[in-house]
Image (cartoon, rainbow, N blue to C red):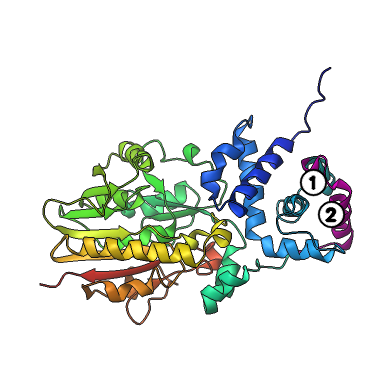
Amino acid sequence: MNRPPEIQGLAARRAALKLLDAVLRRGKTLDQAAGAATAGLVTSSDGALARAVASEVLRWLVDLDALIDSATRQRLADDAKARMVLRIMLAQWLRLETPPHAVIATGLPLLAGGPRRLAHGVFSTLVRQGATLPRAPTLPPAVAARWGERAAAVAAGLAEPPPLDLTLRDPAATEEWARRLDGESLAPGHVRLPRGTAVTDLPGFAEGAWWVQDLAASLPARLLGTGEGRRALDLCAAPGGKTLQLAAAGWQVTSLDVGGKRLERLRENLGRTGLRAEVIVADALKWRPEGGYDAIVLDAPCTATGTARRHPDVLHRIGPRQIAEMAELQSRLVERATGWLAPRGRLVYSVCSLEREEGEGQVPGIALAPDPIAPAEVPAGLPVTPEGWLRTDLGMLAVHGGLDGFFIARFVNSP
């Protein structure tokens, strides 16, 4: 007996359910979970849809749960499959603008052998009531408490996925590329395009005129200026955007990272752009360089909570334990990096984290003289702190589409 054909779109929703289970129950990142969750999907668009659905659930989880609880007499357990499926259904309707009938057709089959009638009743009730989400997501209470006075601005910036940022190989051609790509430039060497743009189809991709890099992620390397053949070390370099920036700015670059596979994208981009760098696969806690460097960029491994716009899983799987572990690793890396600077060499320390322990809290342990960042060195609208540090968050440059959350500080090895 032949099985009836599967409902169109059901496989993508099933993959989204697997993604959410991996993140919320097992603490995996979306990237880590994607391979197994999307295995067997026929098209790349199905994989993209699964990721989009899961991301919107994670972005709006607190508010989706509030809607579900408002329509149930007895509260569903946090890990109940019915709650998870309702989250998926509501995220599609309220965020991805999927018609309710299509939501029901692809959602209820996920509860085979389960409380389909309950899920159908809750969803239909909320549709009849015209349920809505707030303008900005409600952060999980523990996250809001950690981020304190910045929480509201971060939440506002979290409401939408990020646009596409490109870093240009030749900053002098910024105006030309902004025109050719029909984009917006917020700094020399930068062009911003709407999200969803097909990168490989854009002018300039094949000839290596640019690479994808969030505006905030491009700031640390910008703070070192031109290299004029001097030696620079990009420490913990993968996926390599800062290496490309330094090489394009005339530095003789050594790019080091512990992850061989994560450096594959860097090698591909070096070949595409025609830029040069020495790429080394090694553990920075064990590796020893030959001679000192005139500049070091330490974009340290971190909890990456500043990337919550594109990785909303960080809102639900990062807590005090992970923050403490990363802060300890960062301290060890800083201690090693400071010993590799030549006299008058400069260190730029950065993390894509919103946690003070990983940013401001690291500064007292850096045995170098401060080299304060000047306001003129950063894009307009980004405030430099009185200490000369740069702290960005998701709510800054909101009218232009925002940017990732980073902490950046610069130091000099005084003789």
Crowd class of label 2 (few under 14; some 14 to 19; many from 20; radius 10 Å): many
Q: Quadrant of the N terminus?
A: top right
Residue in the picture at 38% in, 76% down: 384
Vertical placement of 167 versus 383: above or below?
above
Q: How far across and down, in percent of the image, does residue 227 sit?
A: 19, 56
Viewer can see residue 314? yes
Query: Which span of residues is magenta-colored?
Result: 110-132
Magenta stretch contains residue 76: no
Marks 1, 2: nearer the viewer? 2
Residue position marked by numbered label 1 in the rendering: 103
Residue in the picture at 70% in, 36% down: 11
* Residue 74 sits in quarter: bottom right
Secondary structure mainly formed by the magenta segment: helix
Identified by mark 2, the residue type is Phe
Describe the element under mark 2 as helix, strand or loop: helix
Outermost residue on the top side: it is 1
Residue contact between numbered discs 1 and 2, judged by CB atoms under 8 Å: yes
Identified by mark 1, the residue type is Val
Query: Total number of numbered labels?
Result: 2
Side (left or right) of 164 relative to 293: right
Tag of residue 262: none
The one of 304 and 112 positioned closer to us in this rendering: 112
How far apart, in angstroms, are the residues tagged by discs 1 and 2? 9 Å
Describe the element under mark 1 as helix, strand or loop: helix
Residue position marked by numbered label 2 in the rendering: 123
Side (left or right) of 85 relative to 251: right
Outermost residue on the bottom side: it is 386
Vertical placement of 299 versus 358: above or below?
above
Q: How far across and down, in percent of the image, does residue 276 sit?
A: 24, 42
The one of 300 and 345 positioned closer to us in this rendering: 300
